[in-house]
Image (cartoon, helix red, strand yellow):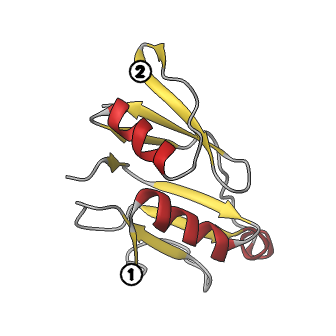
Amino acid sequence: MGLFNVDSLVMCYANIDAAKRWWIEVFECKQVELPTDWDDTLPSDVALQLTGDDEPTILLCDQREVQKAGFERANDHPLMFAGRLKKAHEHLASKGVAPGPIQISGKRFFEIHDPEGNVVEICEE
């Protein structure tokens, strides 16, 4: 299993190419073919698979294309998980992400910002 995992995550971006490069660099995931069983895919959609996963769990979308299609895809409080939170925090810092402090609210977590300013919360499993 990889350092990070997620059940599913959908993020919309103004610059999908820059977002894709960021996700691949920071989370060391890879771009894969869009699964045929994913609903309402769009031509610019990007499916990403995290290290250690058997299938993609991250969908990156172009904001303009999503709006034009009339779909409702929002970046509402995306959550990712890490079995080793401190190691995940250190990994992201080494990638230049500037993670926030580790906090406790039920479980331990910290937040990061993607290149377009969206907050992604990384929670301890």
Q: Position of residue 39 (x, y in %)?
A: 49, 71
Q: Residue at x 73, y 55 (%)?
A: 116
**Residues under labels 2 and 1: Cα distance?**
36 Å
Q: Residue at x 57, y 64 (%)?
A: 22
Look at the numbered disc 1 and give the secondary structure of its residue. loop
Q: Position of residue 73 (x, y in %)?
A: 65, 58
Between 62 and 98, the one lying in front of the other is: 98
- Quarter of the figure with residue 66: bottom right
Number of the front mark, 2 or 1: 2
Report the disc number at residue 6. Answer: none
Look at the numbered disc 2 and give the secondary structure of its residue. strand
Residue under circle 1?
Answer: 36
In this view, which residue lies farthest toward the bottom? 43
**Above or below for 122 versus 32:** above
In this view, which residue lies farthest toward the left? 1
- Quarter of the figure with residue 11: bottom right
Between 101 and 16, the one lying in front of the other is: 101
Q: Residue at x 41, y 20 (%)?
A: 108
Amino acid type at mark 2: Arg
Task: Find out whether the residues at labels 2 and 1 contact each other: C-beta distance under 8 Å.
Answer: no
Q: Please report whichever mark, 2 or 1, sits nearer to the chain's N-terminal start.
A: 1
Residue under circle 2?
Answer: 108
Between 98 and 30, the one lying in front of the other is: 98
In the figure, is residue 122 to the left or right of 125?
A: right
Circle 1 crowding by C-alpha within 10 Å: few under 14, some 14–19, many from 20: few
Amino acid type at mark 1: Thr
